[in-house]
Image: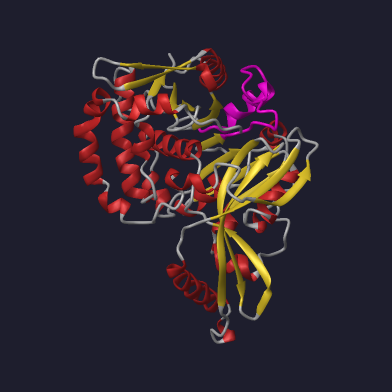
């Protein structure tokens, strides 16, 4: 997915306008107080504040993976940049944690194995050198008994790209607002079946599997080169790769996977497959579906949003009929228009492309179902839109489904999601960028 930053002129007009800030002042101060305990949890090492370390191409990055794809992605490469966080002061604590985990798994070794952190890097997946598809943070380490054997581990708590944060925030919030029992899934008492169409570096599925113990995440990626890049150069768990028969490609996870991931890698299922072919054969009913499927030419295949395609008909069967939620990453470019309502709250108005795609999903997934709703959420900093199709939102006591009603209910629900999941960032912060109900 090609990413383009909003122009400074636009960003300033949104975030610094006195009228806009006044509109959110009272509610924002309350939210910050409410979320204080949440923010005391995991540190947000993926904050956009650190983007200067990896966003610009002239900061000393070097290529660690490069291969040619025949699946429409052109030259697939991974570029590494040094990371300032976590600082060296915290490395010893992580080394002790890894040693403790090893002792739990291999108690016969008497806890003698030591681990050494070698450093942390940002690693970005590129298509054709120009398109930055995803960015992750990777830890390099080795076992003391095998100093020459270096392993890379993607940091599951770190989401670097605002559009991925937006997809996670709006998806989990909409699902919870549809009365899905997210709290039980967060405690591991209830399965949360998630389908990710498009893999990239794997940060989104890894984040969800690590933060929601009940999440079982199925990933479908058509390009084997992308899968190889994510595992070899971006630290995605190798044990997650599945065969077409639904079995793990590896007979068992190696010792480093067991130390690093506990059961997380067992709840990730990565398939090399065309999305249409996979969904036509699949029988799983999914609570939440994420779609980020742009190729190396920055094209979102029409068959993935054609309301009459076999893919759409199969996806309709796979999406839970009561609360199923689909989130699609769209590159809006100049197709986004902004307005402000009478209270000076920002409203995004999806242009012709966003409306066309939204209407296709409405016809294909909702049909005549009056309980469904389609809306678009703006992504902070980037020219992207998170398009949401909800099968359960309209019927859950929301009354009139105008933009302000939907926004208020989502904002309130997002506070509950923040509290239950203790994410390193606030869902509320990503929803307040603005939504448009596509009726």
State the residue at coordinates (53%, 43%). 193
Count the marks: 0
Residue 145 painted magenta: no
In the image, is 412 to the left or to the right of 144? left
Q: In which quarter of the image is the N terminus?
A: top right
Which region shows up in magenta? 291-320
In the image, is 271 to the left or to the right of 433? right
State the residue at coordinates (44%, 53%). 45
Picture quadrant of residue 413: top left
State the residue at coordinates (35%, 37%). 429
| Residue closer to the observer: 402 or 331 | 331
Colour treatment of the image: secondary structure
Q: Quadrant of the C terminus?
A: top left
Picture quadrant of residue 15: top left
- x and y percentages locating residue 433 in the rendered image: 37, 29
- x and y percentages locating residue 301 in the rendered image: 67, 25
| Residue closer to the observer: 20 or 405 | 20
In the image, is 191 to the left or to the right of 245? left
Is residue 294 visible to us here? yes
| Residue closer to the observer: 430 or 55 | 55
| Residue closer to the observer: 200 or 358 | 200
Residue 292 painted magenta: yes
Is residue 243 visible to us here? no
In the rendered image, the vertical position of residue 431 relative to residue 136, given as above or below = above
- x and y percentages locating residue 51 in the rendered image: 49, 44
In the rendered image, the vertical position of residue 283 relative to residue 85, given as above or below = above
In the image, is 98 to the left or to the right of 394? right
- x and y percentages locating residue 104 in the rendered image: 52, 76
């Amino acid at each position: 997915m090609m990413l383009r930053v909003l122009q400074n002129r636009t960003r300033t007009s949104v975030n610094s306008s006195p009228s806009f800030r006044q509109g959110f002042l009272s509610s924002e101060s309350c939210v910050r107080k409410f979320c204080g305990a949440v923010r005391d949890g995991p540190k947000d090492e993926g904050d956009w504040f650190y983007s200067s370390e990896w966003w610009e191409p002239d900061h000393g990055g070097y290529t660690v993976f490069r291969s040619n794809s025949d699946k429409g992605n052109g030259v697939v490469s991974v570029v590494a940049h040094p990371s300032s966080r976590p600082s060296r002061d915290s490395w010893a604590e992580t080394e002790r944690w890894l040693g403790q985990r090893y002792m739990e798994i291999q108690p016969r070794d008497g806890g003698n194995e030591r681990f050494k952190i070698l450093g942390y890097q940002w690693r970005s997946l590129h298509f054709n050198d120009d398109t930055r598809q995803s960015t992750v943070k990777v830890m390099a380490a080795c076992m003391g008994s095998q100093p020459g054997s270096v392993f890379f581990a993607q940091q599951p708590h770190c989401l670097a790209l605002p559009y991925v944060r937006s997809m996670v925030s709006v998806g989990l919030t909409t699902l919870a607002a549809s009365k899905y029992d997210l709290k039980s899934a967060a405690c591991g008492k209830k399965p949360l079946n998630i389908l990710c169409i498009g893999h990239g570096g794997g940060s989104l599925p890894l984040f969800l599997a690590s933060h929601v113990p009940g999440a079982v995440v199925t990933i479908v990626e058509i390009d084997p080169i992308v899968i190889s890049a994510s595992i070899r150069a971006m630290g995605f768990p190798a044990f997650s790769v599945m065969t077409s028969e639904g079995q793990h490609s590896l007979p068992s996870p190696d010792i480093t996977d067991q130390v690093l991931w506990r059961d997380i890698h067992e709840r990730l299922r990565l398939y090399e497959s065309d999305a249409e072919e996979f969904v036509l054969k699949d029988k799983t009913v999914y609570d939440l579906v994420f779609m980020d499927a742009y190729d190396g030419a920055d094209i979102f295949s029409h068959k993935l949003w054609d309301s009459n395609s076999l893919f759409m008909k199969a996806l309709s069967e796979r999406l839970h009929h009561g609360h199923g939620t689909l989130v699609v990453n769209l590159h809006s470019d100049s197709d986004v228009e902004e307005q402000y309502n009478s209270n000076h709250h920002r409203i995004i108005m999806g242009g012709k492309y966003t409306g066309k795609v939204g209407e296709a999903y409405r016809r294909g997934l909702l049909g005549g179902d009056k309980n469904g709703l389609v809306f678009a959420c703006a992504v902070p900093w980037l020219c992207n839109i998170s398009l949401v199709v909800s099968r359960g939102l309209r019927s859950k006591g929301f009354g009139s489904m105008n933009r302000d009603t939907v926004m208020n209910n989502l904002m309130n629900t997002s506070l509950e999601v923040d509290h239950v999941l203790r994410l390193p960032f606030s869902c509320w912060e990503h929803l307040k960028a603005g939504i448009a109900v596509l009726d």
